[in-house]
Image (cartoon, rainbow, N blue to C red):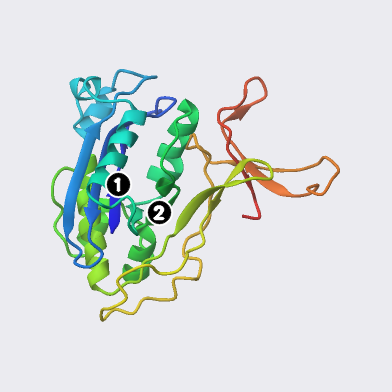
């Protein structure tokens, strides 16, 4: 199975609030055999740091203040989603999380869970960024989700930036690539390095997992497909540094939080060796 997600979060036109918080948690189950959408999950999430939605956020997402006020916390939303997957018989099966871009798992969910010290299910630490197979099939065009759906010859359904509608349209795009015979792989993972307890983001596809048949023959998915540009958990482009202290790591390059000043230090605890 595929589990397609597309979070919506607090935002503003000029500068996003800190921290950004998930306000809509949608999820769609797609069969890897038929490509059919089998079940949907949606809950609104109550922000606990910046309670009031901006007018820009409400206009963009269509989510109103009363909906998030009546929503659940992120930890409760994660628990409900996990129980939903279990009820549907998916949790213990072979499934992959699918997103459009790395923002949902790599930036948004990871940063908020770390900021609020929330434990998230480990299946959110590996996912398929659908942009990568899309570019393999349709070429390296820069486009958002709605434009990608239209490039693929599909008609957009629902409201853009409604999380559930975005997830459903991502699922339709996924099904189209499946029926063309694309062999999907996990494109990104987050894992802990036990030596220094740092989080490392990997972008090395694993073995193809599903849907081997079909007329379309994609390029070798084991070759790098996107340019790596790390972002820290707060969503800001990271800064690069070098270890100057004498020792085995002297001279090694690393990335740290780009939201840093001498007075208050780093905004988040992002760290990654540049060699990764």
Q: Secondary structure under badge 2?
A: strand
Q: Is residue 26 above or below residue 215?
A: above
Q: Residue 5 has which mark?
A: 1
Rate crowding at label 2 as few (under 14), some (14 to 19) or many (20 or more) other CA atoms within 10 Å: many
Q: Kindly indicate the quadrant of the structure image that contains residue 51.
A: top left
Query: Where residue 57 sits in the image (x, y, percent)?
Result: 27, 29
Rate crowding at label 1 as few (under 14), some (14 to 19) or many (20 or more) other CA atoms within 10 Å: many
Q: How many marks?
A: 2
**Residue named by callout 2:** 127
Pick whichever of labels 1 and 2 is earlier in the sequence: 1
How far apart are the two marked residues, 1 and 2, measured between alpha carbons? 10 Å
Q: Is residue 105 above or below residue 214?
A: above
Indicate the quadrant containing the N terminus: top left, top right, bottom left or bottom right. bottom left
Relative depth, front residue between 239 and 126: 126
| Residue visible at 51% across and 58% down in the picture | 203
Q: Secondary structure under badge 1?
A: strand
Query: Where residue 181 sits in the image (x, y, percent)?
Result: 28, 74
- In the displayed structure, does residue 214 sit left or right of residue 159? right
Q: Is residue 83 above or below residue 45?
A: below
């Amino acid at each position: 199975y595929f589990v397609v997600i597309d979070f919506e979060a607090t935002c503003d036109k000029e500068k996003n609030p800190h921290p950004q918080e998930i306000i809509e948690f949608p999820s769609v189950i797609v069969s890897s055999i038929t490509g059919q959408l089998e079940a949907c999950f949606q809950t609104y999430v109550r922000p606990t740091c910046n309670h009031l939605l901006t007018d820009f956020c409400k206009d963009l997402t269509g989510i109103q203040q009363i909906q998030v006020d009546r929503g659940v916390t992120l930890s409760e939303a994660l628990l409900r989603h996990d129980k939903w997957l279990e009820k549907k018989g998916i949790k213990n099966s072979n499934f992959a999380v699918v997103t459009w871009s790395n923002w949902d798992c790599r930036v948004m969910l990871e940063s908020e869970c770390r900021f609020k010290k929330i434990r998230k299910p480990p299946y959110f630490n590996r996912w398929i960024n659908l942009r990568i197979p899309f570019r393999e099939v349709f070429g390296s065009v820069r486009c958002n989700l709605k434009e990608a759906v239209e490039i693929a010859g599909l008609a957009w359904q629902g409201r853009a930036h409604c999380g559930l509608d975005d997830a459903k349209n991502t699922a339709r795009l996924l099904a189209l690539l499946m029926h063309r015979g694309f062999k999907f792989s996990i494109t990104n993972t987050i894992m802990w390095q036990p030596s220094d307890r740092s989080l490392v983001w990997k972008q090395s596809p694993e073995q193809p997992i599903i849907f081997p048949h079909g007329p379309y023959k994609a390029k070798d998915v084991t070759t790098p497909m996107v340019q790596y540009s790390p972002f820290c958990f707060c969503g800001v482009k990271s800064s690069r540094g070098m270890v100057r202290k004498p020792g085995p790591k002297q001279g090694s390059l690393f990335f740290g939080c780009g939201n840093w000043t001498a007075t208050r230090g780093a905004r988040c605890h992002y760290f990654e060796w540049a060699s990764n």
